[in-house]
Image (cartoon, grey):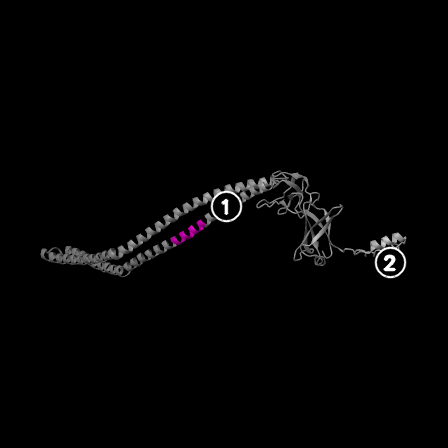
């Protein structure tokens, strides 16, 4: 039971100032200890997500000079032109690519015509060589099976003619000798006739000897030479046909490679034309969706500005369209600062130059990169009043 009401009542009755007495004052409360705030540094606010437009020409080579460009921070509708790029160089390359396709098509047609003519010529050459080989084989076979036998028979017949001619000349001489003896012609006439006949007989004997020697020579040398020539002709015809066939294969291989090269050139020319047409469509630079337009990438956080007459860089984000509201803060942490906080830690975010105090969760990469550890703070809720590129400081309560 609390004694203070009784004491107070008694004091009131007796008129004593008990509450003023030090013995009866309430104990003083100790002052609350101050909370330690740990500062992690500052970063840049960027949209959490957005669609970037990045010129990535596959075939076009040249400058991308801006003739018109939508204002940074303007609201754009899906499909709305964001920028217009000078296209004269692109149009020239497109015309050259179209001419290259036409030239490649004509070259391929000519290559097919050359290939057809080459095939016809090769087939005809092979046919001629085959006929030449058949003729050489037939001549060799004719020599072995017919002509050599005929030559031997002709040799025998020639020998018979010579032998019979000599016999006839000798018989005539004997007959004349007997006739002049019987008819008792004058000695002068007998001497003339007999002398002429003896000379004819002598010439016939010498001629027969020469013909016999020539026949033996022909049989021993000429016939063998003819046979060898026929065999060589067959072998040469075989080699000629074999070489023609090999040349035909090499020629066809070369022709096929030429056709393949022409076809590849046509494919490359068509691919380049297709790529250039794709580049032309890509360089129209239209908004991919409805939203707010930023110049540059999300990483640029609105720090880039494009102007008429400026140039876009290939393979770099030129514009970003994002939905206002969802933001995150990106920053770099030193190894010391990383050791102060943990991944997923709740932090406070104070936007510089404003009274905005936001909260979010800290996400830190496990491994360092250039400039330290990449970190981001995913802000809680949507913050439509934020502006990309604004800076903010990050802190948290120690022990939180």
- Tell me if residue 68 can be seen: no
Q: In what element is the residue under mark 2?
A: helix
Q: Is residue 331 left or right of residue 99?
A: right
Quadrant for residue 166, please give it: bottom left
Q: What segment is highlighted magenta in the picture? A: 245-256
Q: In what element is the residue under mark 1?
A: helix
Which residue is disc 2 drawn over? Answer: 23
- Which residue ends up furthest to the left in the rendered image? 182
First reached walking from the N terminus: tag 1 or tag 2:
2
Q: Residues within 10 Å of mark 1 (few under 14, many from 20)?
A: some
User: Is residue 391 or residue 175 the one in the foreground?
Assistant: 391
Q: Residues within 10 Å of mark 2 (few under 14, many from 20)?
A: few
Tell me where residue 32 appears, x and y as whole percent: 79, 55
Marks 1 and 2 sit apart, C-alpha to C-alpha, by: 105 Å
Tell me where residue 202 appears, x and y as whole percent: 20, 59
User: Is residue 371 or residue 22 the one in the foreground?
Assistant: 22
Which residue is disc 1 drawn over? Answer: 267
Q: Is the magenta region chiefly helix, strand or loop? A: helix
Q: Is residue 246 magenta?
A: yes
Q: Is residue 186 left or right of residue 58?
A: left
User: Is residue 316 or residue 76 the one in the foreground?
Assistant: 76
Q: Is residue 180 left or right of residue 41?
A: left
Tell me where residue 182 appears, x and y as whole percent: 9, 57
Q: Split into 4 quadrants, where in the image is the C terminus?
A: bottom right
Q: Total of numbered circles in the picture? A: 2
């Amino acid at each position: 039971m609390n004694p203070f009401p009784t004491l107070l009542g008694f004091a009131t009755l007796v008129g004593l100032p008990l509450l003023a007495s030090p013995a009866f004052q309430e104990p003083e409360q100790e002052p609350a200890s101050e909370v330690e705030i740990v500062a992690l540094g500052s970063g840049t606010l960027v949209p959490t997500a957005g669609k970037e437009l990045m010129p990535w020409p596959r075939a076009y080579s040249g400058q991308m000079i801006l003739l018109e460009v939508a204002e940074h921070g303007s609201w754009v509708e899906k499909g709305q032109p964001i920028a217009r790029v000078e296209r004269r160089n692109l149009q020239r390359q497109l015309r050259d690519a179209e001419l290259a396709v036409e030239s490649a098509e004509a070259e391929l047609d000519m290559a097919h015509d050359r290939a057809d003519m080459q095939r016809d010529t090769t087939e005809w050459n092979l046919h001629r060589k085959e006929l030449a080989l058949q003729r050489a084989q037939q001549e060799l076979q004719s020599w072995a099976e017919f002509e050599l036998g005929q030559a031997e028979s002709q040799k025998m017949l020639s020998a018979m003619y010579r032998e019979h001619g000599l016999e006839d000349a000798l018989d005539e001489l004997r007959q004349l000798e007997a006739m002049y003896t019987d008819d008792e012609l004058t000695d002068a006439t007998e001497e003339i006739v007999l002398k002429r006949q003896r000379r004819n007989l002598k010439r016939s004997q010498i001629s027969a000897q020469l013909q016999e020697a020539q026949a033996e020579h022909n049989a021993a040398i000429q016939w063998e030479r003819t046979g060898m020539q026929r065999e060589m002709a067959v072998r040469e015809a075989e080699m000629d046909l074999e070489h023609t066939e090999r040349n035909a294969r090499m020629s066809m291989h070369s022709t096929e490679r030429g056709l393949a090269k022409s076809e590849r050139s046509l494919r490359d020319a068509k691919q380049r034309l297709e790529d250039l047409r794709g580049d032309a469509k890509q360089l129209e630079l239209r908004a991919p969706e409805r939203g707010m337009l930023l110049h540059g990438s999300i990483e640029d956080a609105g720090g880039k500005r494009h102007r008429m007459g400026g140039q876009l860089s290939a393979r770099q984000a030129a514009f970003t369209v994002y939905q206002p509201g969802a933001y995150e803060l990106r920053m770099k942490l030193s190894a010391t600062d990383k050791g102060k906080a943990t991944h997923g830690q709740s932090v406070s975010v104070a936007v510089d130059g404003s009274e905005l105090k936001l909260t979010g969760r800290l996400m830190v990469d496990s491994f360092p990169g250039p400039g330290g550890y990449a970190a981001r703070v995913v802000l809680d809720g949507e913050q439509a009043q934020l502006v990309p590129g604004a800076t903010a400081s990050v802190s948290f309560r120690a022990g939180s």
